[in-house]
Amino acid sequence: MSWLLLPLTYLLGSVSFAWLAARAKGVNLRQHGSGNLGATNAGRVLGRKWFFIIFVADLAKGLVPVLIAKALVDAGSAHVTLPVLTAACAILGHSFTCFHGFKGGKAVATSLGVLIGLVYIAAGITFGVWLLAWALGYAVFRLKASDAVGPASVVAALVMPFAHLATFPGPWALINLPLTIFLFLVATLVIVRHRSNIAKLLGKTPPPAE
């Protein structure tokens, strides 16, 4: 029965709080900004406070299922890989939501939520790097607050798996290998989802809305 957590987590991950918040205000988020169903685009369209509200909600839909999965493992009622698979379902649900044509957000907040649940030390380092990169983009490179989110997310994604390797005991041990591989895959997904931001920084495309 514990494996039912996987489809339930995917369905929860597929719930777009950004889309729901926008619709409550009579706005179709797909038709505004970048059309992305994430906290950054919602914040740009609806206002800054909505960025924080939706960011926390998206983080929670990654964190809570992972904590439930870890509790099931600790209780001896689930296999040790359940938390990693649950984390994957949360991120896939957010990025490829079944409720919106499999086109969702860029998985930053939800990824941070699963990181906190799986490897909280690496999560803390990653979030600190994100804050520093965001502050540099905003204060030094004069990016808009919302425009600095994408580059900061890419930098944090690059750092995250190596923070895990540096802080987690035995990351290449057989029992921990699924977790380590998963974190590298998450970093790759976040970077790929932000490819428009990378192209913008390199000056290869006109500045798109986040």
Image (cartoon, rainbow, N blue to C red):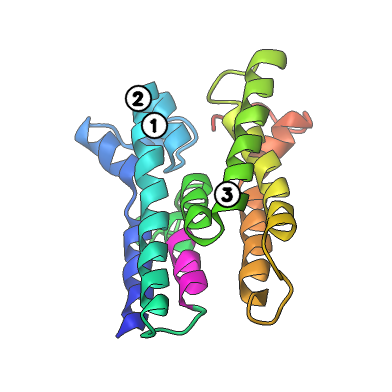
**Type of amino acid at the residue the image marks with label 3:** Ala
The dominant secondary structure in magenta is helix
Q: Is residue 86 above or below residue 91?
A: below
> Callout 2: helix, strand or loop?
helix
Residue 149 is inside the magenta segment: no
Q: Are marks 2 and 1 in contact (CB under 8 Å)?
A: yes
Position of residue 25 in the picture relative to residue 46 (left or right) = left
Residue nearest the viewer, comparing 197 with 208:
197
User: From mark 2 to mark 3, how far is it between C-alphas?
Assistant: 23 Å
Residue 123 badge:
3
**Residue 71 appears in the figure:** yes
Measuring from the top left, give residue 112's x and y in whole percent.
51, 49
Tell me residue 26's x, y (percent): 22, 31
Closer to the camera in the image, 45 or 137: 137
50 and 167: which is toward the camera: 167
- Distance from Cα at disc 3 to Cα at disc 1: 18 Å
Residue 52 circle label: 1
The part of the chain drawn in magenta is: 82-91
Q: Secondary structure at mark 1?
A: helix
Q: Name the residue beneath numbered marker 2.
A: 49
Mark 3 crowd level (few <14, some 14–19, many ≥20, 10 Å Cα)? many
